Image (cartoon, rainbow, N blue to C red):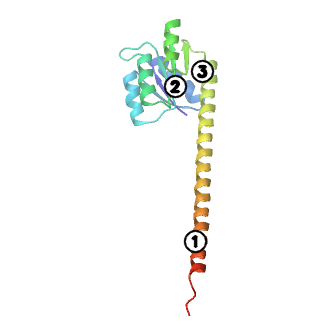
Amino acid sequence: MKIIVVDDDDIIRAALCDYLSREGYGCTVVPSGEAALATLAREKAEVVITDYNMLGMNGIELLKVLRAQHPQTQVIIMTGFADTENAIAALNNGAYAYFRKPLNLEELRVVLERIVAEKSAEKSAELKERMRGDAQTKEAHRLRTSLSALQHLYKYKAEPEAK
């Protein structure tokens, strides 16, 4: 699973990406919401972990754009200045989770595992639907072929014999 880490603090970006890489996730780091959007225009990511307070586009503004442009991407917001209003705003705007800094890495790991499980279930459901569609297409073809053969046979029997 690919994760983009958005934070204006170099140390936090590097440490979080190091942790995510050790956990087996692909990781890209960017210093701003604008850079995150530019990265997502070039490459797909299943998760964006973003700081709430950054210069330029803040985490909620980024979240709103991501919900509109990349609705399949889950967004986790983290902040060193947590308050109830910010948390409610984040969750009401579609954040998957909201964490205070310093991050509890065990809690983050659990949330990421839940996202992986949900994405896997979605892919499984899509595959089943595709397979069902393929089976229905094959059955429809078989029925059309049988019907065509019956029509041909009926037409042959209905024609008078030439003498």
Instruction: Give the spatial CA distance, label 3 vs label 1.
Output: 64 Å
Q: Quadrant of the N terminus?
A: top right
Compared to residue 52, the image places residue 125 above or below, namely below
Amino acid found under the numbered disc labelled 3: Leu
Amino acid found under the numbered disc labelled 2: Cys
Per the image, the residue denoted by label 1 is 151
Per the image, the residue denoted by label 2 is 17
Per the image, the residue denoted by label 3 is 108
Amino acid found under the numbered disc labelled 1: Gln
Q: Dot 1: few (<14), some (14–19), or many (≥20) neighbours within 10 Å?
A: few
Label 3: state its secondary structure. Answer: helix
Figure quadrant of residue 121:
top right
In the rendering, at what x and y percent does residue 58 appear?
41, 16
Q: Dot 2: few (<14), some (14–19), or many (≥20) neighbours within 10 Å?
A: many
Residue located 59% across and 67% down the image: 147
Q: Is residue 44 visible?
A: yes
From the viewer's perspective, is 136 left or right of 14? Answer: right
| Lower position in the chain sequence, tag 3 or tag 2 | 2
Label 1: state its secondary structure. Answer: helix
Instruction: Give the spatial CA distance, label 3 vs label 2.
Output: 13 Å
In the rendering, at what x and y percent does residue 73 appear?
50, 30
| Lower position in the chain sequence, tag 2 or tag 1 | 2
